[in-house]
Amino acid sequence: MSVRRDLVGNTDGHDITVATMRIVAEAVCFVLILSGCASVGPQEPDRAVVDVPITWSVADVMPVAGATSLVEWWSRFDDPLLARLVAQALQSNTSVTGAQAALRQARALRDVAAAALWPAIGSSASVQRSSSGTGAAGRRTTSNSFQAGLDANWELDIFGANRSALTASEATARASAASLGDVQVSIAAEVALDYIALRNTQARLAIANENLASQQETLQITQWRLQAGLVTSLDAEQARAAAEQTAALVPALQTGIEQTSHALAVLSGQPPAALSAVLVTPGPVPQAGDGLALSIPADTLRQRADVRAAEHQVSAAMARVSQAEAARLPNFSIGGSLGVSALTLGALTQGASVVGTLLGSVSMPVFDGGAARAQVSAQQAALDQARQVYRAAVLVALQEVEDALVALRGDRVRLAHLGNAADAASNAALLARQQYSSGLVDFQTVLETQRTLLGTQDGAAGARADVSSDHVRLYKALGGGWSPDPSGSASVPTFRTDSSPARQIVRASTP
């Protein structure tokens, strides 16, 4: 249904001014009448509820209230090259730049949704030249027509459909910002893990070369004793077999170093061989300090980018439900145009005819075969899915922290034992060589101690790298490696504690 009012006149007359003012007054009254209707905005149904433990299960961890700043956790390793590689990756990694483009797109779509709340105004101009046929006097008549005008249309968001669309777009933009943070967290952790793996492989290569040199010396001693008739060929062949087995480890470790170097270069947005000269010099495995104060589980979830992204997706899904419900209600809009028409271009500003139109309309679906109701059901199902995704994100976040804490505790104990074993194996290998040179022990003792030494030293190096990797995984699980957008594009989930002292309730919410 629509109501239309037209007015045609001449700009020279006082009546035209009065009539134009009447058009404006009628439009204002029409807007006020419609705005007086009951406004229905986006409705927020109950949000997802997830149980969260009040503390971590690892007995020797004492969490404290308040989030520990882990935005640049890699600086805790005190390795300038690692910090530089992470910074380069966060700037140039293709996944990061792709997520940044997705964020710009989401923000642009939010601006599109915001524009729907305002009137749309357009302008037009036209020139027409026409001619008539030959008359009785044999003359041909031509005429010109010049027109210019403005058009306006405004969809009155009485029941909140456009506001719900804007709310959904804003939540989607916040989710995209949090998703960018999640990508940054993953890339920083992957760079650190690869860098630790590189340094660990270099350390294992040094251990292999050192043991190979020792085994080659033992082989030389065995050959001398064989020439002197003190041992049999069996000892010499066993010594050679042990040396060759150790030598076979060297090319495999060198291959691992080069491949990891390639992976680090690609992560930082460079060609595979770009970092070969930088990483060729061996360095120690970076070690993190133990002075990390863990936050309580609820604060940890506030730091997690993926949890925030899932929470914002719940908000967006709720807004889309409200938008679908508002689509079943009447839609009001007003529009109008104001233009001038003259026979000459100069007359457009003086002596032109004025044409004004005001149009008010209301539309409402009468029968659509249940499509609108089905759309509401579809959006409600999408909301239920978003809630479950949010709940899964919370549970996975808690699991990752618990797993990292358990792994860190176990690897620290394992490293201590392997370190002691490596020291003992080194002493045993030295004593066995000395006693073998003096003929006090047989070659089997030397061979066994050398194998034990290589295994324990390699295991200790691996355990040391595992402890560093456990720290990286813990920092990632705690939500380190990103910071919310200062413009407010990422909100902070709120958590409510119920009356039970053993549990906390997590509720997704958007300020």
Image (cartoon, helix red, strand yellow):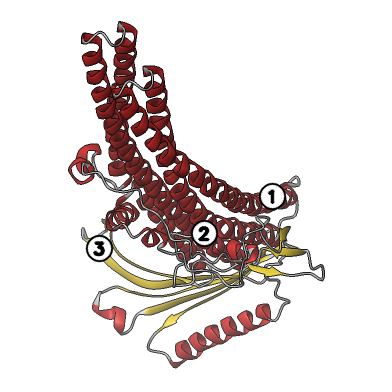
Residue sitting at x 73%, y 76%: 38
Residue 415 x/y as whole percent: 48, 45
Q: Which residue is mark 2?
A: 479
Secondary element under disc 2, as helix, strand or loop, is: loop
Q: Residue type at mark 3: give it.
A: Thr
Residue, disc 3: 142
Residue topped by disc 1: 388
Q: Where 84 falls versus 193 (above or below)? A: below
Which of the image's four quarters has the C terminus?
Answer: bottom right
Q: Nearer the viewer, residue 338 or 467?
A: 467
Question: In this view of the protein, which residue sits in the foreground, 314 or 274?
Answer: 274
Mark 3 or mark 2: whose residue is earlier in sequence: 3
- Which one is in front, 383 or 39? 383
39 displayed left or right of 210? right
Evaluate if marks 1 and 3 touch, with contact meaning CB atoms under 8 Å apart.
no
| Crowd tier of the residue under label 2, counting other residues whose Cα lies within 10 Å: few below 14, some 14–19, many 20 or above | many
